[in-house]
Image (cartoon, grey):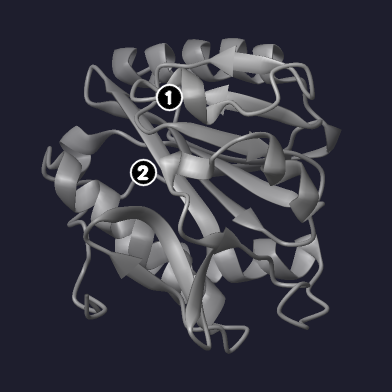
């Protein structure tokens, strides 16, 4: 599918989006509790929209479409059931997770446009490192061509409550790619996974964070 460079979610007010970065590894249940509370506060109008950048300890999450047979090694890492869309995915050190808490009522109340915006955000971010990320109609996430094969470099999974989004994206910077072997990532068996460092790019988490911020505003305001 061709890149959609015209994606922009029209913003209806100039209220700023707050960015937060957590150092160290954030336990998944703690992150979910904080995100739940903040999403409700955004819906009430008592807190600003928020982008939260973090890393988790090694774990697997199961989205609403996850199939039990895709959890290959049940005892390898903790497994968390979550309300986001999608199937199984891995989170761990060296992977940048960006939890995206935005009020879609400010951006046209269009969930499909929001997901397309997330994809374009990842693609534009990777482009700053001369990596061509691509979307696929039949596969979630962002993909990189590697000769005859395609590898997944970023995952996307969201949930919407009261028109406020949560969960978001994860981009592989330098995770242990062997850890993906305990699941069938997103239910896709025919393709692999990769990372920026696996592609030969010595990108740091700080480098990626700068690129994420630079790419965000043209799409989301």
**Label drawn at residue 135:** none
Q: Residue at label 2?
A: 15
Q: Residue at label 1?
A: 63
Please state the horizontal and vertical placement of residue 191, each as a whole percent of the image. 50, 61
Q: Is residue 70 above or below residue 217?
A: above
Query: Which image quadrant for residue 116?
Result: bottom left
Crowd tier of the residue under label 2, counting other residues whose Cα lies within 10 Å: few below 14, some 14–19, many 20 or above: few
Q: Where's the C terminus, which quadrant? A: bottom left
Front in this rendered view, residue 57 or 152: 152
Secondary structure beneath disc 1?
loop
Front in this rendered view, residue 201 or 183: 183
- 188 horizontally vs 201: left or right: left
Crowd tier of the residue under label 1, counting other residues whose Cα lies within 10 Å: few below 14, some 14–19, many 20 or above: many
Q: Where's the N terminus, which quadrant? A: bottom left
What's the residue at 53%, 57% (across, down)?
Answer: 154
- 204 horizontally vs 161: left or right: right
């Amino acid at each position: 599918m061709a890149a959609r460079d015209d994606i922009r979610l029209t913003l209806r007010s100039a209220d700023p989006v707050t960015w937060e970065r957590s150092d160290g590894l954030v336990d998944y249940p703690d992150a979910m509790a904080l995100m739940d509370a903040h999403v409700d506060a955004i819906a009430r109008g008592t807190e600003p929209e928020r982008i939260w950048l973090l890393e988790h300890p090694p774990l697997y999450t199961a989205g609403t479409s996850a199939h039990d047979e895709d959890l290959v090694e049940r005892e390898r890492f903790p497994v968390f059931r979550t309300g986001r869309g999608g199937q199984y995915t891995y989170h761990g050190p060296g992977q940048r997770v960006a939890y995206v808490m935005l009020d879609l009522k400010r951006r046209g109340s269009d969930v499909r446009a929001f997901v397309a915006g997330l994809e374009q955000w990842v693609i534009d971010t990777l482009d700053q490192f001369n990596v061509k990320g691509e979307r696929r109609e039949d596969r979630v996430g962002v993909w990189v061509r590697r000769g005859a094969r395609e590898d997944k470099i970023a995952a996307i999974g969201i949930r919407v409550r009261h028109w406020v989004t949560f969960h978001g994206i994860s981009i592989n910077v330098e995770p242990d790619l062997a850890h993906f072997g305990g699941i069938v990532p997103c239910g896709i068996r025919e393709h692999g996974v990769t990372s920026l460092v696996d592609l030969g790019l010595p990108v740091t988490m700080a480098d990626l964070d700068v690129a994420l911020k630079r790419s965000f505003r043209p799409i989301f305001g």
